[in-house]
Every structure is written in C-alpha cells, then in structure tokens.
Image: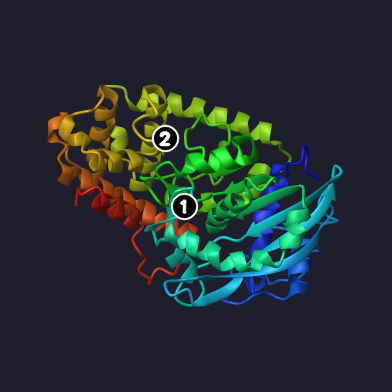
Amino acid sequence: MPKGNTLTPLEAAQIATNVYFTLDSWIHFTPRANTESMKNIQNRVLGNASVGSPQPGSGRTHVNSSLKGGGLGSAQIANVHSATTGVLLTQTSGFGYTLSFQGDGSKHVVIATRGTRPEMNAMPDLVTDLRATMRNYGDYGPVHTGFLKTYESIAANLDRDKALIESADVIHCVGHSLGGAIATLIAGRYAGSGKKVKLYTFGCPRVGAGNTYLNFERRIGVENIHRVSHDLDPVTLIGPYPFIHIQPRFDDRSNLILPSRSGSFLTAANHDMDLYIQSAAGKQWSDLRLEKAEIKHKDDILASWLLRDDNTGWVRYACVKTLSYLFRLFRSALRVLSTAVVLGLSMIDVVAEILIRGLHLVGQFSKQLLQLLEHTAYWATGIRIKGKENFTSELIRELLEKMFQVVKTTSIEAIGKVQRNIKPVALSVGTTWALSSFNVI
C-alpha cells in the first residue's frame, strides 16, 4: 500500500511492467497492434499471472508483476486505453490502463502507459521514439513531437475516466521507456488541477527541450517526481541536448540513478524492466537515494584513476566498455566543475553543446574538460589531439557521430532487440535538428 500517498518503488515498477500486457499477444511474446482481452489483462495485472507462453529459447516466462497479494491487490481496472504510433499514426494498440483503489483514507487513481515494442509491423513505436522534432505542449514549452502525438491519441481515452479521475485525491502516473515519456505528459495534464499528482518513470527518454523541464518540476513538484534510471541505460540518452530530463542534475532529489544490474557496461539489458524490478524490490525511495550516493563515490574513484597523467591506455579498451567509462568520467568531472556546461551530465550532451554554442570557437574549455575531450577524440578517431585550437567543428561532429553510432545500436537493442537485418533509424535526429536550428549545419 502506498506510504504517505506515494507508491513504493516495487509497486511502481510492477505497474510499469504489467501495463505491457495491454498490448495484444504480449503474453505470448508475439505483440501486435491491437488490444489484449480484458480477461487476460486482469489476470496479469491483478490476478494469478497464470496466462502466457514461455519466451522462445529462454525457457522462462515474464517476471511476475501482478499486484495480487500486495498492498494494491484490491485495486480495480477502470478502463484499458489504446494509442496510435508510427509516422502516419495508423497503428493503434493497447497502451495503458486506469486503476483505482482506496488507501489511507484517500481515493487513488493510477494511469499507467507502456513502453516501446518494435516487433509490430513497421515498428510504429520505434518511429515515435525517434521522431525528435518539437512542438509546444500548452505553456510548458517545446516537447518531443512523437511523444506528444502519442499522448494526444490517448487523451480521448482518458476522457472516459474523467469522473473517476476528478473524484480522486491522488493521481499516480507511471511508465517505462516511451511509457515514461507519455506518463510525464499525462502528469503535466493534471498538475495544477487541485489534485496531488505523482510521477514515476523508469528508463525514460528526455521529453522536453530548453526550460520545459523547469515548468514540469514547478507544476508537479519535485517531491512528487520519481525518475528512476540505471546509470548505463542507453534509452535515457535518447533526445540529447537541447532535450533535458526532468531533475537533470546528478544531485537532484528526484533523479534516482541506480547501479546497472546487468554486470555489463553500456548494454540493452540495463533498460529491461525485469532488472528495474530487481533494483526496486524490498526498498523505499530513501534506499534508492543511498544507492545513488554509492554511484557518485565509485564514479569519483574511477575518474581520479582515469585522469592520471600516466594513464592513457584505458581509451584503447573495447568500444562499448570505453564509452561507458567516458559517460561516468564526464558525469564525475561535471559535478566537480559546474552544471553550467550542460544539464544532461553525459558526454554526448557536452560534445553537442560545445558544437551548438560554438564553444570550440571561443575557447571556453577548462583544463579538465579539454583533457576529457582529448581522450574522447582518441577513442573515436585514434588521433591524439592536443590543445583546444585543434578541436574544429568537423572533429567535434565526428566525435558526436561516433558516439551516437554506439548508443544508437545499443538503444535499438534495448527498445526491443530488433532483428539484425533491420537497419535502425539514426538516433542523432534530435541533435541534427538542434544543430540546424542553431545555424551550425
């Protein structure tokens, strides 16, 4: 049962996982653009989780994310929602549900939205994720067009629950991946309506650009936001600068970065909800904040070792492993230097902003940032660069493209393990749009 009108980490993670069962045949690992039967959804969300097929080749079923037996076991599903995704918004599929329950003398409503599934014909969800142009979302500011269009398609479904939502004391908005982005927009819809709105996201991409994140924080309240991400989840990098996460700074209260549980570095497994459930099980939100502090400690130790003058061999490691080091290294260095460089706190954001703002022309490089860029250039090109005057826009663009290539491949795998013979859409569209908007390409 929610404590202090807030879902526990495990309750939020279970909801973010079981909402996938609204997609037709997700229980059989063959999802398609339609909505699952209410009987099967009830079984997987609130029942015995007994329906479904083993995953091909794995010998296991989905993690049991049913709420039965927990504090939300008495909840009821009010409605199942559909949404449209894809370039022409022609693929309609089960996308979420509204749940209601009583707790601590209050009426609660949960609005859950699912993440991306690219197995469907033409990969409509994936196209939505990568459609990184911008449109204004009310007076919040510019947001990701693909996310906004999917939200708009689900909004009519939410109108069916208008009376239920208006009668609730607390509205909980929950989602994983693309579902986290839609949950953010839904939370924005109800924030300021006189209701207490809570937002819980797992592995969420970046939703808004510029100062949009500040407007979401102010309306929802940072104490009501729980943005959970594994530190090397590649999908959280979708929508690079100028897209900015809600609570973007490492030390922000609601930015709950957790150690990746895969045992690997930048890998698709870090995006898996099974692992997010493992990270959340048996813990309170205060416990997750302590785990984030441990990441900071490990990052700082790693940074002090990597930046030793006599230690340059690490950039010769395997591509993905080195990229993971670079992400952690930039994050640690920016905490020491300033958050004024960029709020995203990842090296892709740093390189993109250097190019967008023309910092390579005006020489606004600190000694430590310059050293990191020299390591990054060597990792990406094999060329040793010395001195800020050698960082031309062409070289920085090359660094950016190389980093995106790695993140692109890993993110595509994370979003659904797309078959190898399908050529993925470039994830660099967001930054390409930004560069053109700032007249640097």
Classify the position of the N terminus by image quarter: top right
On the question of residue 70 being in view, the answer is no
Give the residue displayed 73% in from the left and 41% down from the top. Answer: 6
- Give the mark toward the camera: 1 or 2: 1
86 is higher (above) or lower (below) than 146: below
In depth, the one of 323 and 14 nearer the eye is 14
At mark 1, the secondary structure is helix
Numbered circle sitting on residue 328 = 2
Give the residue displayed 56% in from the left and 76% down from the top. Answer: 33
Q: Earlier in the sequence, mark 1 or mark 2?
A: 1
Q: Which residue is mark 1?
A: 235
- Residue 249 at x, y = what percent? 47, 33
Tell me which amino acid carries mark 2: Arg
At mark 2, the secondary structure is helix
On the question of residue 179 being in view, the answer is yes
- Neighbour class for label 2 at 10 Å: few (<14), some, many (≥20)? many
24 is higher (above) or lower (below) than 58: below
In depth, the one of 332 and 149 nearer the eye is 149
In the image: residue 426, left or right of residue 16: left
- Residue 104 at x, y = what percent? 85, 42
Tell me which amino acid carries mark 1: Val
Give the Cα separation between the discs numbered 1 and 2.
Answer: 16 Å
- Residue 416 at x, y = what percent? 50, 63
- Residue 213 at x, y = what percent? 48, 42
In depth, the one of 409 and 197 nearer the eye is 197
- Neighbour class for label 1 at 10 Å: few (<14), some, many (≥20)? many
In the image: residue 229, left or right of residue 2: left
In the image: residue 104, left or right of residue 241: right
Quadrant in the rendering for residue 42: bottom right
Give the residue displayed 69% in from the left and 43% down from the top. Answer: 9
